[in-house]
Image (cartoon, grey):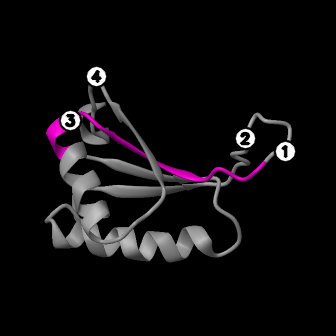
Amino acid sequence: MPNIMICGFEHKEPYELKTVIDAVMQNIGLGNNAMTSIVKMNAVSCDGKMSPMPYIRICSTDEDEIQRIINAFRKAGIRVDIEWLVLNGFISADKMT
C-alpha cells in the first residue's frame, strides 16, 4: 500500500494537490490500494533564508510501484520535489491480532 505524503505545503495547496494525486492514483489503478497523508510542517532551506521547500514523499514496499507512481505524476504535470522510500515491510491491522 503506497503512502503519498504531502509535506510542507501551505493553506489550501495540499488539498488541491491531493485532488490531483487521487485522480492520478485512480487512473493507474492504485486508488483503492494507496493513501495520502497531509503532513503539516515547515520544510525550509538551510541557507539562512528559510525559503519554503515543500515536497512529496512516496513510501512503499514495491520499488517498481514507486517508479510507476513517479512516472504517472510526471505525465500529469505534478512539478514538485519528490523523494521516495522503499519500506522493508507492511503489516495490515487485521494481521495484528
Residue that appears at 23% across and 56% down: 71
- Mark 1 or 3, closer to the camera: 1
Instruction: Name the amino acid type tagged 1.
Output: Lys
Q: Residues within 10 Å of mark 2 (few under 14, many from 20)?
A: few
Q: Quadrant of the C terminus?
A: top left
Q: Is residue 43 left or right of residue 88?
A: right
Residue that appears at 31% across and 28% down: 87
In three-dimensional space, the C-alpha distance between marks 2 and 3, rounded to whole angstroms, equals 28 Å
Q: Earlier in the sequence, mark 2 or mark 3?
A: 2
In three-dimensional space, the C-alpha distance between marks 1 and 3, rounded to whole angstroms, equals 35 Å
Q: Residue tagged by mark 3? A: 63
Query: Which stretch appears magenta?
Result: 51-65
Image marks 2 and 1: residues in contact by CB distance under 8 Å: yes
In three-dimensional space, the C-alpha distance between marks 2 and 4, rounded to whole angstroms, equals 29 Å
Q: Residues within 10 Å of mark 3 (few under 14, many from 20)?
A: some
Q: Residues within 10 Å of mark 4 (few under 14, many from 20)?
A: few
Q: Residue tagged by mark 4? A: 88
Q: Residue tagged by mark 1? A: 49
Q: Secondary structure at mark 1?
A: loop
Which picture quadrant has residue 79?
A: bottom left
**Res. 97 visible in picture:** no
- Mark 2 or 4, closer to the camera: 2
**Res. 53 visible in picture:** yes
Percent x, y of residue 70? 28, 52
Instruction: Name the amino acid type tagged 4.
Output: Asn
Q: Residue tagged by mark 2? A: 45
